[in-house]
Image (cartoon, helix red, strand yellow):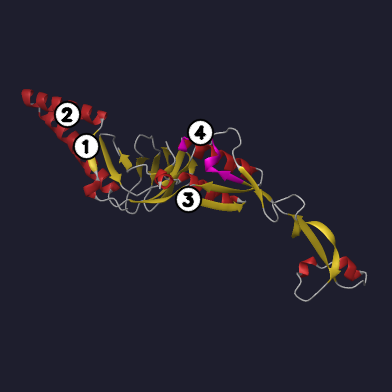
Amino acid sequence: MVLTRKQIFIRPTRHGLLFLIILGAMMAGSINYNNNAGFILVFLLGGMALISLFYSLKNLTGMDVAFVSARPVFAGQTNAFTIQVQAKNQERVAVNFALPGQAGPWTTIAKNETKTLEIPAQTAKRGVFIPGALTLCSVFPFGFFRLGARLSLHMTCLVYPMPVKGGAASDRGGSGTGGSADTRHAGPDDFQGLSLYQPGHDVGRIAWKAVSRGQGIFIKNFTAGADHFTLLNFDAFVSRDTEYRLSRLCSMVLAADSRNQSFGLKLPHTLIAPARGQAHKKKCLRALALYSRKKEAA
């Protein structure tokens, strides 16, 4: 979003108010005593302040601010919204960027410079978090006037439920015939022996040692046990509080992923098949973050 003059508001700072009061007192004294030197000083200082105001306004006009991204966080954590600021025709200027209720960073931007900044924002509850309008301000160059603007960049981020630890509540299951530990299938875990090579077999499984000894071309056979998985069930908790259930499920998703365990997630009207890995974890956390009570009541 490119900043225009219509978006910029101007207010005097504390130092600016004090400066204007002193200037007014000097003007009144010069009129009372008909002091020409006083008039010259008042007009000189007032002209400098007025010129600095127009200079500051020109310096902010045309600045380009764009929202880049925001990583997902857990409820109650402080998130960082990444923005990109580009100064096209501005001279060197110090600008502050902040979100509602937060203290943002000050940064100095030079002419034709592009900077990437992270603006902090405190999250409160799960779901899609909208921090509000981005506020920028500058007191450049003398600190007499505060020039600011409110920019609606449509910034959002995903907030996961806050993890809450507690007793286990899940359904155990497995793949294959009931998920028993002795169920076997072809896989990469245990070496079971050699068999003659047939066209179409994976070349990477050829037993090259047997080939080098002149015994013929064989391939290595492996087996792996069927994975047990855990089904994390929304309805398996004693508590009827929806947010508590989601927080417990969030904690269990993180725990299962840290153990590299295969797990699935069952919510009302939603079933995520058992799997493992970062993509599966993010899919489950996203489902918990976006869970709606309206679906529960349907």
The percent position of residue 256, horizontal first and vertical second, equals 62, 43
Disc 3 on helix, strand or loop? loop
| Residue at image mark 1 | 49
Magenta segment: 231-242
Residue at the spot of label 3: 269
User: Which label was assigned to residue 141?
Assistant: none
Hey, which residue is sitting farthest bottom in the picture? 199
Residue 57, image x and y in percent? 25, 45
Q: CA distance from mark 4 to mark 2?
A: 68 Å
Relative to 188, 85 lies left or right: left
Label 1 packing within 10 angstroms: few (<14), some (14-19), many (20+): many
Between the C-alphas of marks 1 and 4, the distance is 65 Å
Q: Residue at x 18, y 26 (%)?
A: 22
Q: Are marks 2 and 1 in contact (CB under 8 Å)?
A: yes
Distance of label 3 from label 1 (alpha carbons): 65 Å
Q: Position of residue 290 (x, y in %)?
A: 44, 47
Percent position of residue 165, x then y = 57, 33
- Of 212 and 29, nearer the camera is 212
Residue pictured at 66% horizontal, 43% vertical: 259
**Residue type highlighted by circle 3:** His
Pointer 4: what residue?
A: 239
